[in-house]
Amino acid sequence: MKTAGELGWPHICCFAHALHNSVSRSFQDIEVSNLIQKIQKCRSLVKHFRSSPKQFNILIEMQKKLHLSQVKLDTRWDSTYDMIERLITNKSPIVNLTLEKRS
């Protein structure tokens, strides 16, 4: 970049660098930071059920007990929206499992 300036060429921003800076600034926003923390909590909840066949089967049984469709939870990197949507769909079974576990 310094050499280009010394040659009198116009300064052209690197798109990747500009994108990185704008994304980095947005993560400093408190609301975005809170959203990211909530998404991470959702991911860890889904991973709990995905990593243990026993817990996964318990969730499926609770879905059946509540007469809901048996929907698998997912954490693929490109499906954050789908993950949150499935968690919302499975809110009742997850809450019931949590209440059963407490008692």
Image (tube, helix red, strand yellow):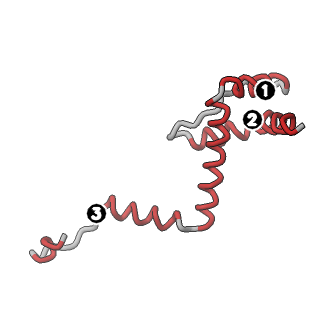
Q: Comparing marks 3 and 1, which lies closer to the viewer?
A: 1
Report, in whole angstroms, how far the alpha carbon at label 3 lies from the one at label 1: 50 Å
Q: Mark 1 points at which residue?
A: 63
> Among all residues in the image, which is located at the extreme right?
103
Q: Residue at x 24, y 68 (%)?
A: 12
x%, y% of residue 19?
39, 61
Q: Is residue 102 left or right of residue 39?
A: right
Mark 1 or mark 2: name the one nearer the start of the chain. Answer: 1
- Marks 1 and 2: CB-CB under 8 Å? yes
x%, y% of residue 46?
65, 37
Q: Mark 2 points at which residue?
A: 90
Residue 75 vs 60, above or below: the answer is below
Q: Which residue is drawn at 62% across and 43% down?
A: 43
Residue 18 sits in quarter: bottom left
Q: Which residue is drawn at 75% across and 28% down?
A: 59
Mark 3 or mark 1: name the one nearer the start of the chain. Answer: 3
Q: In this view, does 42 lie to the left or right of 11?
A: right
x%, y% of residue 101?
83, 35
Report, in whole angstroms, how far the alpha carbon at label 1 lies from the one at label 2: 8 Å
Q: Name the residue under label 3.
A: 14
Residue 60 sits in quarter: top right
- Secondary structure under the numbered disc 3 in the rendered image: loop
**Is 61 in front, or is 20?**
61
Residue 75 vs 62, above or below: the answer is below
